[in-house]
Image: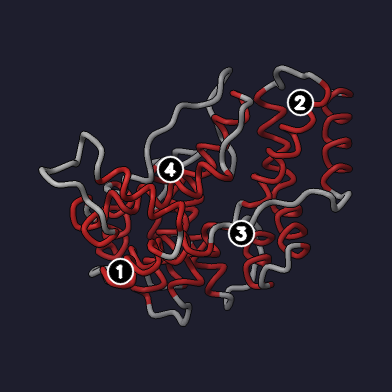
Amino acid sequence: MKSQEKFFTQLNKSLESDQGTLPIFSAVSLQIQVALIKDQPDLKTIEKLISEDQSLSSSVLRRANSVWYCGLVDTTTVRSAIVRLGMAEIMQIVSNDINNKLFSSLDDQIDVIMKQLWQHSVGCAFSAGMLANTLNCGVIREEAFTAGLFHDIGKLLILKVIEGKKKAYKVFDIAPDLLLESIKSLHAKHGYRLMDRMKIPKMYAVVARDHHLKRYDHENFLLVLVRLANTICHQMGIGFMHDPAIDVLSTEEAVLLNLTEPQLDKVRHFLLNNPSIIELPGTPGGSLKID
C-alpha cells in the first residue's frame, strides 16, 4: 500500500510540474479523417490534403506500388494511388500516420497500452463525428471528431511520463493494476491541464475533464456526444473495455440526443468495418479495464 501511494504521489507531482507536453496531432491527418466520415468522401479534397503532406503522400504512393496493389504500370500520382487503394485503405494509412508518431513506445508494457489507447481514441473520434453528422444537435462534425480523439489525451501524457521514469530509473515492469489505476485516476484532471497549457480550445479541454463525471452539463452537446461515443466503444470492446451488456439506447446521453437504433447500427457498422480499428492484445499480466 505504501509503495502504491508513493508511486501515485511521485507521478502526480511529475504531472503537475507543467513540464509534460505532447506533439500536436497532424492537422492534415485530422482533416483527412474527418473528410472520410462522409457518406460520399470527396476525392478532390482528400487528394489535395494528402498532396500537401510529404510524409503522407509518399506513404500512399509506396503502398499503391507495393506487391499487394501494384498493376502493370507504376502509380505516380496521389489521385491514381487513391483510386487504386480505395478509401478504406487511405483511412488506414492516415490513421497509422498519427498512431506511429504519438501512440508508440519502445517499452513493451507501455506500447501495448498505447496501441489500445489509440484504438479507443480513434473509435470515439469516428463515433462522435458520425453522431454529430446524423443527430442534428448543433455540433459540427469536425469538432465532434476532434473532441473524441482528444478526450483521453491525459492517458497518453501519463503513459509518456511513466515511460520516461521507467527508462530513467531502469524499472523494467510495473504491476498492471498499479499502472492502470494511475491512468484511470489521473487522466481527466491532467488531460484538462495539458490541453490548457497547449492552448487547445477550451471546449475540448472541458470534454477531457468531464467525460466521466456523474454530474455534467447536459446542454454541452459536444460533451454528451463524446460520452455517448465512449459508451459505444466500451459496449463494442474498442480499446480497454468490453461490456456487451451495456444498453446504449437506454443511457442518459442516448436519451438526451434522441438516438435511434438505426442510427446506432450505422455507427457500429462503420466501426466494425474500419481498418484503423483492429483488435489488439491486452497487457501482460491481466486484461485492461480503464474507463
Is residue 181 toward the left or the right of residue 275 in the image? Answer: right
**Image quarter in which the N terminus is found:** top right
First in sequence: mark 1 vs mark 4:
1
Q: Which residue is mark 2?
A: 166
Cα gap from disc 1 to disc 3, whole angstroms: 26 Å
- Amino acid type shown at disc 2: Lys
Secondary element at tag 2: helix
First in sequence: mark 2 vs mark 4:
2
Cα gap from disc 1 to disc 4, whole angstroms: 21 Å
Q: Residue at x 25, y 64 (%)?
A: 262
Cα gap from disc 2 to disc 1, whole angstroms: 42 Å
Front position among marks 1 and 3: 1
First in sequence: mark 4 vs mark 3:
3
Q: Which residue is mark 1?
A: 38
Secondary element at tag 4: loop
Is disc 1 in contact with disc 4, using a CB cutoff of under 8 Å? Answer: no
Cα gap from disc 4 to disc 3, whole angstroms: 17 Å
- Amino acid type shown at disc 1: Lys
Residue 38 % position (x, y): 30, 69
Q: Which residue is mark 3?
A: 211
